[in-house]
Amino acid sequence: MTYATISWKRTVLVLILTLSIWWSLQWVAPVYAGEKDNAETHTLLVNFAPGTTVAERDAVLARMDAELVQWIEPLYTAEVRMLTPGTNLLANTMASFLHEQQVVSIEPNGYVSGVPVELITSTPGEAGGRSTIPPTPIQVNDPDFNDPQRVYAPRMLQLSHAWQYTMGTPSTIVAVVDSGVNPAHPDLLGRILDGYDFVNDDEEALDDHGHGTHIAGLIAATANNGIGSAGLCPLCSILPVKVLNASNVGTWSDVAAGIVYAVDHGAQIINLSLGGTSNAPVVQAAVAYATQHNVLIVAAAGNSRSDTHFYPAALEDVIAVSATRQDDTRWSLSNYGSWIDVAAPGFTIYSTYHDLNNYYGGYIFMSGTSMAAPHVAGLAGLLLSQNPERTAADLRRILVETADDLGEPGADIDFGAGRINAKRALMLEAPQPEKDAVLSGTVWQDENENGTWDATEAAGGLNLTIMVFDYENNVVGQVSIDGDSEWRVEGLYPGHYTVEAQPNGRTVLTTRQKYAIVLFESQKIESLNFGITELEENTAFNHVYMPIVVSN
């Protein structure tokens, strides 16, 4: 075998291995609806005319030889199971009973699954006062939240700045219509309300898959409890509604019933990290019911790398969310299309898990638009907590208007209006503070170079520039000292600033070089003084500059 042949084969092998590794990072352990689930859950949906009485409904079902599985009263829709086996359910039933006066439509009950997720087993307060420029980011003590190798999305969304305005309120209720939630998870204690299980028809919406608990944590995991991470709206409440089974599979009828249940039990925001390509009329009706009751619905766009409409996300009254990566590119498996409203981080997202004894002790990495949607729902929760008078339309408008434009300028098929930005969203309609804070001080000649202004030392100095920087390191004030003794910068918003003296020529400082400042509205800080001296020829001066923090 020649060297050229060996080299060629080695190149091909390396290429194959590279592609294999890349693909494994994109698609790990997908979860799909199985054929067994399809066979065992087949029912029909009978939509009755408004005003149909229970007696009239039951009479129709008796003539159909069907038993009632569940009645979604606000939608006048019955899920039924045919008692006569071996018949063509749809054709025979429609032909025989669509002429019934009370029957509007009959259709098969379709199947829905939690948007396929990827399980990754390894990986490389309240409002903060009147300010449109948050003074300093809110810091929390949750270790995973502060580990950029595990949690990256909050930094992209500038969440810590958004928390200056609010970290949510318990009265803001976000429904997670999914596989249930583990209420005993230590990072969700106190966040989970009593919900309902439409899969097992009981009042314990417990998670036996993990998908729903992961989503609940992204929305409302507790902050500052010293464990795990933190949700976008860590003081908001979660209403768990179980519509997906242990295989992450459910029916459209249960999804519709879950939406109605969430609306009727106080949810103001509903997260739907599930869906399919069929546009079920019963779900359309449920979404319309939510819209009529001023409830915002956020849904995952799907993980098929396709522009095919994915429902319920593609419905007009639903916010459709695509998924992005750490570099603000579209995640390769995320669906796309003109029906996408906004994007959010969805690749290798770390959050709570129903199994407290797994590798990460109750946490896990997942990827998908399933993970992108709750980022949007959680931000909507913050916006509603900031102003409870906001309508669902208001929330949609702010989410879209404040998104960071990605991809092609303006709305595009990959990101919609762009990737959401929590800081911009919370700042948009925040009360405007007065721009009347002041920083000032004195410069003096420190003749004995002891860093203290003695009575015999004169004010005033030469060749000194004083710079004022905001919390994003932008210069907002600059004063050149040339024989003057006083410096002053006015017209500042409340916020976090750094004041730095920059000596010129042979001028040196005998005091600290920097002050770290927290300014509040209308506050005047007038004691930021700097001592200076001038070096003689061939003289060295050594001084350690120690910054201090000044506030009110």
Image (cartoon, helix red, strand yellow):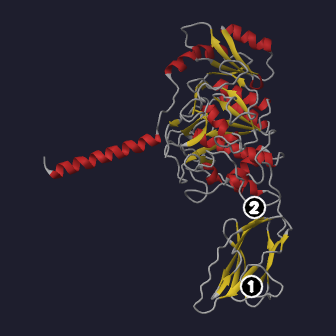
User: Dot 1 surroundings within 10 Å: few (below 14), some, or many (20 or more)?
Assistant: many
Spot occupied by residue 492 in the image (x, y as percentages of width and height): 79, 71
The residue pinned by badge 2 equals 135
Spot occupied by residue 23 in the image (x, y as percentages of width and height): 42, 42
| Residue 417 seen in the current view | no
User: Dot 2 surroundings within 10 Å: few (below 14), some, or many (20 or more)?
Assistant: many
438 and 429: which is toward the camera: 438
Identify the residue at image location x=75%, y=60%.
134
307 and 103: which is toward the camera: 307
Label 2 sits on what residue type? Answer: Pro
Q: In screen coordinates, is 17 left or right of 465?
A: left
Identify the residue at image location x=82%, y=57%.
129
In space, the residues marked 2 and 1 are separated at their CA atoms by: 33 Å
The residue pinned by badge 1 equals 446
Label 1 sits on what residue type? Answer: Asp
350 and 546: which is toward the camera: 546
Spot occupied by residue 257 in the image (x, y as percentages of width and height): 71, 25
- Look at the image and tell me in which quarter the C terminus lies: bottom right
The image quadrant that residue 348 belongs to is top right
Q: Secondary structure at mark 1?
A: loop
Image vertical order of residue 32 relative to residue 537, above or below: above
Counting the numbered discs, the total is: 2
The image quadrant that residue 200 belongs to is top right
